[in-house]
C-alpha cells in the first residue's frame, strides 16, 4: 500500500490540541506503513493568516517530533492550479459564474462514501446548500481547494476530525466531477472537555504551545495525545513514541469522542520526568531558571544536577520548579503567610531557630547527614517533638509548609544561606 497522508492546518491561530492529535495520527499512520507525511498550509484566508501562527505551527510540530516528508506547500501559492480546474468545470457546464463567484451545479443524488472507522455513509445532496468553488475575490473555498490539492498530491488517505464528515460528501461529488480517484476517508473522534463539549479554554489550555511553555515533556505529550481515541492494548499507558509507531493501527481508533483528562496527562508527564536522565532533567530545569534570571550562563552544573535529583520524584511539570521551588534560587524565600502564622509565630520558636543556627554555624561540611545529626540532637536535648522544630525550620528556609526532604534541601541551599534565613525568620 502506497500511503500518502497530509496535515493541512490554517495559520489563523495557535495549533490546537485537537489539530495536533490529527497531525499525530496522520504521522503515525504514515510512519507505520513506511509512507509519506505531507504538510500543507491552507492560507487562502489572507486576512486571518498570520506569520506568527505559521511559526507556532512549525514550533509545535517540532516539539511533537513530527517532521514533514514533503512540504510545506502553501495554498496561496497554488492559485493557478485552482484556476485551471475551475476552467475545466466551467467549460463542461458543471459550474457557473454567479455574482462574481463560481458555483458548482449540484445534481440531486445520493452520495455514498466509506469511512474507514464508520463504514458506509450515505447523504442526499438535497441537504446541501449552494456549493461555492471560488469566491468573488478570486480565492478558492475550502472544499474545492482541498479536493484539488489532495488529488494533485496523490493523497491516499484523508485522516481528519469527524467535524469534517459534513464536508466529505460535498468533496466526493467534486472528486467525481473532476475525474479524480477518491482517497480513503477516516474521520477520527473529536476531543472533548470534562463537560463533553468540544475542548475549550474553559477546561485549561487548548494550544500545544501552552503545554510546551508549562513544561510537559514532548514524549509524554505525544504519548497522551496518542491515547486520545486509540489504545496500544494490554491496558498499557506509558508507550514511547517509537513503539507507538510500531503498534499504531488506524482501524482500532475508537468512534466515540475522546475526553481530555488533565489529571491523567499530569500523571503521565510525572512518570516520564521520573524516568528522565538526571543530566537532561537538570538542563531542562536550568533553562527555565535562566529564563527567569535566576541562573547565570556559568552556573554550577553539579549543583543543578543535585537539585534535579532531589526534585525528580516531586515534579508534575517543569514549571513546578518556578512555582514551588523558587526558594532554591532566590536570596530570600517568598513566605506563605499561613505557614508563617502557623509555624513561626509560636512561643519559643524564634529562640530555637537562633540556637540551631549557632550549632549549624560550627559545621565544617554542610552535608545532609551532619545537618540532620545536629538538628535531631538539639531536638532531644530540648525535649521537643520533631515537628516542634522541623516545621518551623522548613518554613524559615523555604517560606513554605511543604518542601522536598528538609536536610537535603538545607545542604543544597548552602550553609550561609541557611544561617541567614534562620536569623531572618527569628525576627519575623
Image: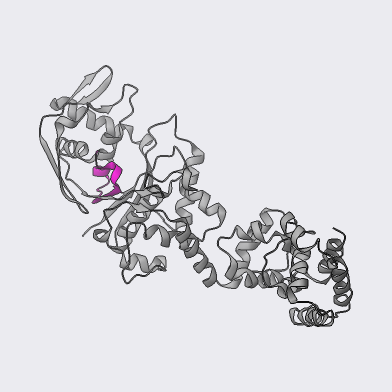
Q: Residue at x 28, y 39 (%)?
A: 146
Instruction: From the top left corner, tell me how far across and down residue 425 is, in percent.
Output: 83, 62
Drawn side of residue 121 relative to residue 204, left or right: left
Evaluate whether residue 329 shows in this view.
Answer: no
Which residue is nearer to you in this view: 279 or 124?
124
Q: Which residues are magenta?
A: 150-166
Give above or below for 411 relative to 184: below
Give above or below for 99 relative to 147: above
Instruction: From the top left corner, tell me how far across and down residue 419 is, in percent.
Output: 85, 68
Q: Residue at x 10, y 30 (%)?
A: 108
Instruction: From the top left corner, tell me how far across and down residue 133 is, in percent.
Output: 25, 29
Residue 369, quarter of picture: bottom right
- Which of the image's four quarters has the C terminus? bottom right
Drawn side of residue 54 relative to residue 230, left or right: right
Which residue is nearer to you in this view: 145 or 394?
394
Drawn side of residue 110 relative to residue 389, left or right: left
Give above or below for 426 relative to 141: below
Amino acid at each position: 500500500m502506497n500511503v500518502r497522508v497530509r496535515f493541512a492546518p490554517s495559520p489563523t491561530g495557535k495549533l490546537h490540541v485537537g489539530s495536533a492529535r490529527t497531525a499525530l495520527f496522520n504521522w503515525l499512520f504514515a510512519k507505520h506503513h513506511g509512507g509519506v507525511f505531507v504538510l500543507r498550509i491552507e492560507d487562502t484566508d489572507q486576512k486571518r493568516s498570520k506569520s506568527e501562527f505559521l511559526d507556532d505551527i512549525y514550533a509545535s510540530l517540532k516539539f511533537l517530533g513530527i517532521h514533514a516528508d514533503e512540504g510545506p506547500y502553501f495554498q496561496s501559492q497554488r492559485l493557478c492550479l485552482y484556476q485551471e480546474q475551475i476552467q475545466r468545470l466551467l467549460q463542461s457546464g458543471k459550474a457557473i459564474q454567479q455574482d462574481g463567484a463560481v458555483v458548482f451545479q449540484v445534481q440531486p443524488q445520493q452520495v455514498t462514501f466509506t469511512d474507514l472507522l464508520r463504514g458506509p455513509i450515505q447523504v442526499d445532496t438535497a441537504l446541501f446548500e449552494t456549493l461555492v468553488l471560488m469566491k468573488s475575490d478570486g480565492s478558492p473555498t475550502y472544499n474545492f481547494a482541498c479536493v484539488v490539492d489532495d488529488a494533485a498530491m496523490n493523497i491516499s488517505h484523508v485522516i481528519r476530525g469527524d467535524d469534517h464528515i459534513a464536508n466529505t460528501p460535498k468533496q466526493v461529488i467534486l472528486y467525481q466531477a473532476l475525474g479524480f480517484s477518491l482517497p480513503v476517508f477516516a474521520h477520527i473522534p473529536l476531543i472533548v472537555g470534562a463537560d463533553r463539549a468540544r475542548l475549550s479554554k474553559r477546561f485549561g489550555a487548548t494550544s500545544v504551545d501552552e503545554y510546551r511553555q508549562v513544561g510537559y515533556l514532548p514524549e509524554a505529550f505525544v504519548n497522551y495525545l496518542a491515547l486520545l481515541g486509540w489504545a496500544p492494548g494490554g491496558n498499557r499507558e506509558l508507550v514511547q513514541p517509537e513503539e507507538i509507531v510500531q503498534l499504531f493501527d488506524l482501524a482500532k481508533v475508537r468512534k466515540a469522542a475522546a475526553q481530555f483528562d488533565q489529571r491523567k496527562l499530569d500523571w503521565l508527564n510525572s512518570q516520564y520526568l521520573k524516568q528522565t536522565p538526571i543530566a537532561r532533567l537538570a538542563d531542562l530545569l536550568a533553562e527555565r531558571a535562566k529564563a527567569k534570571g535566576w541562573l547565570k550562563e556559568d552556573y554550577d552544573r553539579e549543583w543543578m544536577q543535585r537539585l534535579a535529583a532531589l526534585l525528580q520524584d516531586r515534579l508534575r511539570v517543569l514549571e513546578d520548579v518556578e512555582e514551588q521551588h523558587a526558594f532554591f534560587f532566590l536570596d530570600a524565600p517568598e513566605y506563605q503567610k499561613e505557614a508563617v502564622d502557623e509555624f513561626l509565630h509560636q512561643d519559643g520558636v524564634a529562640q530555637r531557630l537562633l540556637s540551631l543556627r549557632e550549632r549549624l554555624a560550627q559545621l565544617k561540611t554542610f552535608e545532609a547527614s551532619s545537618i540532620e545529626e545536629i538538628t535531631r540532637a538539639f531536638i532531644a536535648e530540648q525535649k521537643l517533638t520533631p515537628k516542634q522544630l522541623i516545621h518551623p525550620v522548613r518554613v524559615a528556609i523555604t517560606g513554605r509548609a511543604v518542601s522536598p526532604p528538609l536536610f537535603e534541601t538545607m545542604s543544597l541551599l548552602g550553609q550561609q544561606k541557611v544561617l541567614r534565613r534562620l536569623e531572618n525568620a527569628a525576627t519575623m
